[in-house]
Amino acid sequence: MPRRIAVLSVHTSPLAQPGTGDAGGMNVYIWQTSLELAKRGIEVEIFTRATQSTDQSIVEAAPGVRVRNIVAGPFEGLDKTDLPAQLCAFAAGVQRAEAREEPGYFDLIHSHYWLSGQVGWLARDRWGVPLVHTAHTLAAVKNNALAVGDTAEPQARIIGEQQVSDEADRLIVNTEVEAGQLAAIHDVAPDRIDVVYPGADLHTYTPGDGAPARRELGIADDEIVLTFVGRIQPHKAPDLLLRAAAPLIHAHPDRRIRVLVVGGPSGTGLERPDALIALARELGIEHAVTFSPPRPPAGLAEVYRASDVVVVPSYSESFGLVAVEAQACGTPVVAAKVGGLSVAVADGVSGRLIDGHDPAVWAAVLDDLTADPQLRQRLSDGAAAHARQFSWARTADGLLQSYARAIEARQAAAQTVRRRRRRSVGVRA
């Protein structure tokens, strides 16, 4: 088991609020797994790019978890697409931080997303420790399922992902589906890939009373609430929920359907989801749509409890933490049948999975759910039971198994090199 690991997260800090900017499920993943590893006595140091001049260079974020904010480029206004030009500066900051410590300070590097993998590849060679990498998303997968108005991932990212896939000692993916995609797209041998399911904080996300959140949001007790949680971006498809709900709201005013959108724009966008507000007005449902900013975990749990159904209509998703969190609160989920959502949601048991993104098809499924409270209750019971298998403790167990394989393989390779050198010396003698 490693004593201390370096976790690399170039483009987003695990301390940032998920649901806006570039902060999302990856932030939650890094933070929660770091806490779990620290509980096992492993020291975790997370390297991320400073985004404010007030960011302290070192933050003792939790017992055993340290966050190092590396200055690399302007603090504000730098889009994720501009970050490849700052990787040299970030890598230099990582190397300087390690150089201040005693030799052998880190036992392993775990990089997240391809930008971090590029830095991890360099650090691995300099420090002589294993590199474990989690892509979280793959450019080719996203490009094969672009939403209208979305931008294709650049060729530079595809090349970068290939390089990291070639160089990492172990590659961690969220599901068996992603393992197959990684192997096929980047020609990775299956025995280098470890499948580790993400989790949910099952102490925070629990079934409970949704009335307080409804009162805060101005939502009546008798309204049926259909909720979207996440960043406002084409890829996440929050517009699909509005388009699917609109005919139901108009046709069945007696059901008192309410759409709740919780989140903020992606990247360096505006603070309000103006395009969605305009769409609600265009569809004639602005009176039945409530927008709320991102919330910390405790507040988000209240939102899930206040919801009758959580909708996850993404065009691609390596897993879908929102789906698991909502189900852990006893809220059924209607999700697109893409990527890891087919694992996160048990179709017909904890929610529904839908092929494609036709608003009429989604409207039909939501029509069934909003019309049948007994169906919603059955799926609610199934949701809470299904979510219990996804815990961050279990995720950390899987990470440790992958780390052990990486360390063992590197030690075996080093022993082979030493034996060859000894034989070579013996031959020359």
Image (spheres, rainbow, N blue to C red):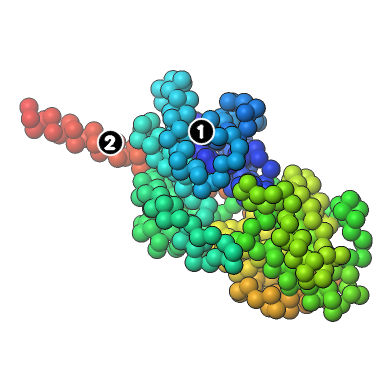
Image-quadrant location for residue 232: bottom right
Q: Is tag 1's residue or tag 2's residue first in the polypeptide sequence?
A: 1
- Is any atom of residue 396 visible in this view? no
Using the numbered discs, state the Cα–Cα distance from disc 1 to disc 2 in whole angstroms: 37 Å
| Neighbours of disc 2 within 10 Å: few (<14), some (14-19), many (20+) | few
User: Residue 169: x and y, percent?
Assistant: 38, 45
Q: Amino acid at mark 1?
A: Ala
User: Residue 264: x and y, percent?
Assistant: 70, 51
Comparing 359 with 192, the one in front is 359
131 shown above or below 63: below
Residue topped by disc 1:
72
- Is any atom of residue 288 visible in this view? yes
276 shown above or below 378: above
Answer left or right for 38 relative to 127: right
Image-quadrant location for residue 279: bottom right
Of circles 1 and 2, the one toward us is 1
| Neighbours of disc 1 within 10 Å: few (<14), some (14-19), many (20+) | many
Please tell me the numbered disc located at residue 415.
2
Q: Which residue shows up at 42% across the image and 56% down it?
A: 155
Q: Amino acid at mark 2?
A: Gln
User: Residue 285: x and y, percent?
Assistant: 82, 68
User: Residue 175: x and y, percent?
Assistant: 53, 59
Q: Which residue shows up at 56% across the image and 30% down it?
A: 68
Give the structural element (helix, strand or loop) at label 1: loop
Answer left or right for 124 relative to 233: left
27 shown above or below 368: above
